Image: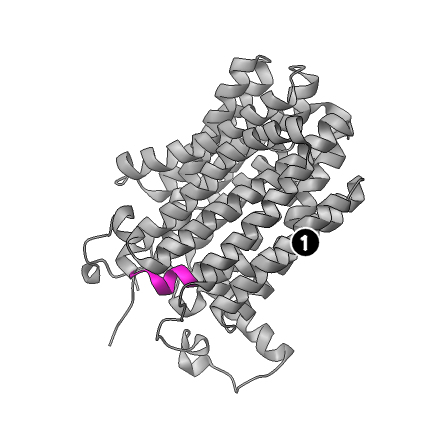
Amino acid sequence: MSTTPTTPAAMPEPLSMGAVLRIPVMRRLWYAQIVSNFGDFLALFAVIGYLTFTAHAGAQQITGVQIAYQLPIAVLGILAGVFVDRWPLKPTMVASDLSRAGLCLLLLLAHNVWGFYAVLATISVVSSFFGPAQGVAIRSAVPLHGLRAANALMQQVLFLARIAGPAVAALLVSTFGATSCYWADAASFVASACLIASVTLSRPQEMAATEVLNPTDKPAEKKGLGMVWSDMKQGVSFIVHHAGLLFVILALASGMFVLGCFGPLIAVYVRDTLHGSTRFFGVASAMIGLGILIGINVLNTFAKGIKNTVLVYSGLSGIASGLVLLTVLGFFWSTILGNFVIGFSVAAIIIPAQTMIQQETPPALMGRVGSTVMSTVFTGQILGLVASGLLAQYLGVRQVFAICAGMLVVLIVIGKLFMEPKGEAVV
């Protein structure tokens, strides 16, 4: 008997976002996402703003903040998913939130670059377990025909936080100092933990993770490191052997590589090229989130019939166009417009990637596949961060933007020739 969740004929009418929010568990998870993500952006942009405009840190030190925050997730992502697929959901998520609340307060004791790096890296270690657990929780709380709406809701929260976070962080830092953002971030994690603790979370009654693949391929029961290694291979194998999913994930990671080059240098660009203030840095950074948020809604409404690959290529082209604006022009309005175009274009990559991951992944592999995707994306961003710091030091920020635009054009050609699946396998 086939129970494959991706069979269109078996799908009821998709739920709206409003209908999904009427599910009590999903509504609490959504509230938790709002407060914790907003607090996260407050703290992160407070650290970047403090180091840029108060400590006068260089480009490499600024990019180091992002690297410290993302590297543990990139390294531990695949491994974390193995445990998330086996651990109880609610204790994992609550413990993660409370641990991060305590760690945020350690930012109060950080007064140099390395202190900030250490605290942010430790927070990231804990976060590498929370993200996949949250994905599994949503999958268990929401019916299959509501997953797209649920995923859209969570993505919108992320980018709304990105819009408001930089501006609010800049205001708080300039008025009360960076420590106010650290206290707010710690409080947001406590609030998130309380919301998650108030709901009942259980895994769906589905086949065991070790039975997802062909049962004849299942080895004898393993323990310890052997079990962990076997589970990791199972998740990676599913992605590698799914041509369409692999292409979209690689394109997403490649786009994030260029975005990693671009993102942290905006602060230096505002300071050195535009001679702007902390407040304008907050506004300029927020435009990326605004572009992504509007892009998600516009493309979800008007691009339903467009192929995933066409959306991905359009997104990569749009990011390149935004970078060209920043390279050629050096005005406040062109920075706002360029950042918005880049954000809108990122949405054209996120939509097909998130849709395919939700639709194509077996429920029992959600933790591992989700964490592997997260690890791949963060690895791309980190490589971009490393490259941006080195290139900006020797070539200049605007030259880095030009190189990134050129790389995207090359990526589109390579993707069309080698990375795009030649045909959709129907199983």
Judged left or right of residue 416, residue 130 is right
Q: Residue at x 73, y 24 (%)?
A: 395
The span shown in magenta is: 137-143
Above or below, 170 relative to 96: above
Toward which corner of the image does residue 215 lie, by quadrant?
bottom left
Q: Residue at x 46, y 38 (%)?
A: 159
All told, the count of numbered labels is 1
**Residue 381, image x and y in percent?**
60, 43
Depth order, front residue of 385/155: 155
Above or below, 324 relative to 109: above
What is the secondary structure assignment of the residue under circle 1?
Answer: helix
Toward which corner of the image does residue 292 lie, by quadrant?
top left
Q: In which quarter of the image is the N terminus?
A: bottom left
Whether residue 423 can be seen here: no
**Residue 204, image x and y in percent?**
36, 71
Toward which corner of the image does residue 59 lie, by quadrant?
top right
Judged left or right of residue 45, residue 310 is left
Depth order, front residue of 132/309: 132
Depth order, front residue of 376/140: 140
Q: What amino acid does circle 1 point to?
A: Leu
Whether residue 417 can be seen here: yes
Q: Residue at x 56, y 43 (%)?
A: 39
Q: In the rendered structure, does residue 105 fall within the stretch colored magenta?
A: no
**Residue 217, image x and y in percent?**
46, 80
Depth order, front residue of 141/168: 168
Q: Residue at x 38, y 50 (%)?
A: 151
**Residue 134, image x and y in percent?**
47, 59
Judged left or right of residue 153, residue 121 is right
Please tell me whether the stretch drawn in magenta is mainly helix, strand or loop: helix
Q: Quadrant of the C terminus?
A: bottom left
Q: In the rendered structure, does residue 139 fall within the stretch colored magenta?
A: yes
For mark 1, what is the residue? 103
